[in-house]
Image: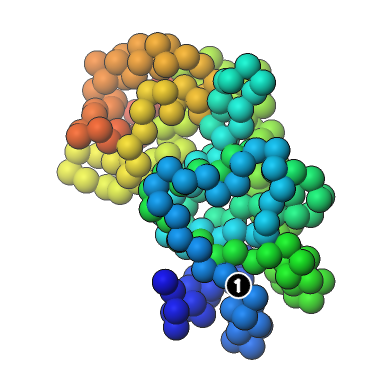
């Protein structure tokens, strides 16, 4: 558990950037520490949301399922990201499912405390608005990609995004720090696993990527970007 380190953790969360020690102490008082094992569901699509969740450590997969069982991965979240804010602002049920990709720790601020926090702390309200704005822009970009991009281009964009958000540099190149399957990639870009496997094989043949122990390594990201042209 986070214990005495909770204040230092709150200081590292972008949502609370710029807040003074006195305000952080008040937020600490209303925050609840939660731990989840890999594969646990934190929020289930079309159910009520308990509060605002802030990811402290681990990785989360955000996905939406259709009535016929198809799944679309909307995002993979890293420490510092938040979930649940949309449902708390519009009082609607969750629009997506949130599942842990690895053991994860989160901070929960219950709905009534979150709404009161927005009224009391304008800096937090402004940051929430910025986060929603970024997510809206991301959704607009995804709609554009689905409408105008080929599956190959959407896959390359997804690989570049993973490299930017969830990676580490190695002697081989940029290593995506998550075990991402071809089905995961298919769910991200709205395609089939078979199509993704075929394109990944082509990218590997062209020495743009390589699989190392189940992890994707991008050998030359600048050359990979030229494949979008």
Q: Nearer the viewer, residue 1 or 10?
A: 1
Quadrant position of residue 44: top right
- Give the number of callouts: 1
Residue 68: x and y in percent read 63, 16
Furthest residue in direction bottom, as rendered: 22
Is residue 17 placed above or below 151 in the rendered structure?
Answer: below
* Quadrant where the N terminus is found in the figure: bottom left
Residue at image position (67%, 26%) is 143
Q: Which residue has dot 1 on it? A: 31
Q: Residue at x 64, y 23 (%)?
A: 66
Indicate the position of residue 126 as horizontal and vertical percent values.
74, 64
Residue 51 drawn at (x, y percent): 67, 59
Residue at 46% in and 38% down: 161
For the question of whether residue 20 can be seen, the reply is no
Of helix, strand and loop, which one carries label 1?
A: strand
**Left or right relative to 72: residue 113:** right
Left or right of 82? Residue 136 is right
Residue 150 seen from this side: yes
157 is higher (above) or lower (below) than 68: below
């Amino acid at each position: 558990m986070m214990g005495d380190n909770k204040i230092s953790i709150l200081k590292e969360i972008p949502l609370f950037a710029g807040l003074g020690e006195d305000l952080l102490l008040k937020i600490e008082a209303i925050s609840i520490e939660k731990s989840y094992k890999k594969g646990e569901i934190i929020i289930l699509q079309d159910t009520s949301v308990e509060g605002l969740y802030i990811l402290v450590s681990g990785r989360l997969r955000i996905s939406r399922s259709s009535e016929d069982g198809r799944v679309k991965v909307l995002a993979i979240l890293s420490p510092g990201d938040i979930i649940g804010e949309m449902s708390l602002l519009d009082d609607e049920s969750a629009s997506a499912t949130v599942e842990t990709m690895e053991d994860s720790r989160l901070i929960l601020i219950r709905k009534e405390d979150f709404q009161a926090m927005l009224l009391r702390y304008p800096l937090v309200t402004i940051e929430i608005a910025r986060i929603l704005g970024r997510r809206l822009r991301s959704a607009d970009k995804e709609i554009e990609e689905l409408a105008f991009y080929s599956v190959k281009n959407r896959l390359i964009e997804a690989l570049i995004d993973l490299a930017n958000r969830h990676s580490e540099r190695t002697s081989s190149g940029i290593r995506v720090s998550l075990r991402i399957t071809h089905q995961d990639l298919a769910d991200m870009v709205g395609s089939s696993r078979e199509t993704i496997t075929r394109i990944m094989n082509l990218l590997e043949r062209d020495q743009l990527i390589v699989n190392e122990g189940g992890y994707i390594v991008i050998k030359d990201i600048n050359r990979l970007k030229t494949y979008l042209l």
